[in-house]
Image (cartoon, helix red, strand yellow):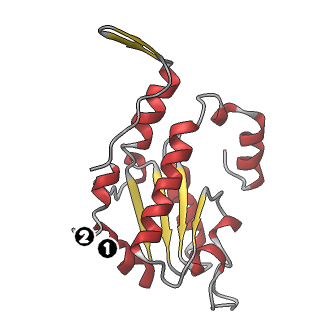
């Protein structure tokens, strides 16, 4: 069982005080709702990660969501054909803020061995990616490590980051409103 460290704060006999931002960060990090977008062999490794041997639920991500409106972590796994790119982008746009993206496997990260006209050479061409998990396919331990990196991002992200001009410019570079 994973234990959660208490945030920095002031404590005394019978009380503990910290900032709201830190408490919300801990809550977000330990209750991610992933939306698996699996197209090929990386999806099988994700299924192994969800199984009892690796048990992704230990990290607060036991409820995969198959609706973008109820998810905050998009996990893109496997080969993404160029015809699928608009659908992946639409799924991303339908997710509520804050949202994170994990690209899993060589194909989602860079097109993998499929350097052809029909395969998207990395999903970062259509949506911003927060964490890359390399491998062909990556082991479940790598997927869990990627999830831990997303948790670190969620825990330490300020409330103001999503409204920052830099973040708005990043979304604008992908034609996302």
Tell me which corner region of the image, top left, top right, bottom left or bottom right, holds residue 115.
bottom right
Locate the C terminus and report the quarter of the image it occupies. top right
- Name which residue lies at 54% across and 51% down: 100
Residue located beneath label 1 in the image = 47
Q: Is residue 114 above or below residue 56?
A: below
Q: What element does badge 1 sit on?
A: helix
Q: What element does badge 2 sit on?
A: loop
53, 115: nearer the viewer: 53
Tell me which corner region of the image, top left, top right, bottom left or bottom right, holds residue 49.
bottom left
Which disc number belongs to residue 34? none
Question: Can the viewer see residue 40 in this picture?
Answer: no
Q: Position of residue 48 (x, y in %)?
A: 31, 75
Q: Which is in the foreground here, disc 2 or disc 1?
A: 2
Locate residue 48 relative to residue 23 in the image: left or right: left
167, 11: nearer the viewer: 11
Crowding at dot 1, Cα within 10 Å, few <14 / some 14-19 / many 20+, comes out as some
Locate residue 166 relative to residue 91 in the image: left or right: right
Q: Position of residue 163 (x, y in %)?
A: 67, 32
49, 114: nearer the viewer: 49
Query: Dots 2 and 1: beta carbons under 8 Å?
Result: yes
Cα distance, mark 2 to mark 1?
A: 6 Å
Residue located beneath label 2 in the image = 51
- Name which residue lies at 35% across and 52% down: 59
Q: Is residue 112 above or below residue 2?
A: below
- Name which residue lies at 28% across and 55% down: 57
- Name which residue lies at 48% across and 18% down: 9
Q: Position of residue 77 (x, y in %)?
A: 48, 73
Which residue extends farthest front? Answer: 13
Q: Position of residue 161 (x, y in %)?
A: 66, 34
125, 45: nearer the viewer: 45
């Amino acid at each position: 069982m994973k234990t959660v460290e208490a945030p920095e704060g002031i404590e005394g006999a019978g009380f503990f005080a910290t900032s709201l931002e830190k408490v919300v960060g801990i809550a977000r990090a330990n209750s991610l709702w992933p939306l698996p977008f699996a197209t090929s062999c990386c999806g099988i490794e994700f299924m192994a990660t969800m199984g009892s041997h690796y048990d992704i639920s230990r990290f607060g991500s036991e409820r995969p969501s198959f609706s973008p409106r109820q998810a905050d972590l998009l996990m893109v796994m496997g080969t993404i054909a160029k015809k699928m790119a608009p659908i992946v982008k639409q799924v991303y746009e339908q997710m509520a803020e804050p949202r994170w993206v994990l690209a899993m496997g060589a194909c989602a990260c860079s097109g993998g061995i499929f350097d052809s006209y029909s395969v998207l050479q990395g999903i970062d061409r259509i949506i911003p990616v927060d964490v890359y998990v390399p491998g062909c396919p990556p082991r479940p331990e790598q997927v869990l490590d990627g999830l831990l990196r997303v948790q670190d991002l969620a825990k330490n992200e300020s409330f103001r980051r999503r409204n920052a001009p830099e973040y708005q410019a990043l979304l604008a570079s992908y034609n996302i409103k």
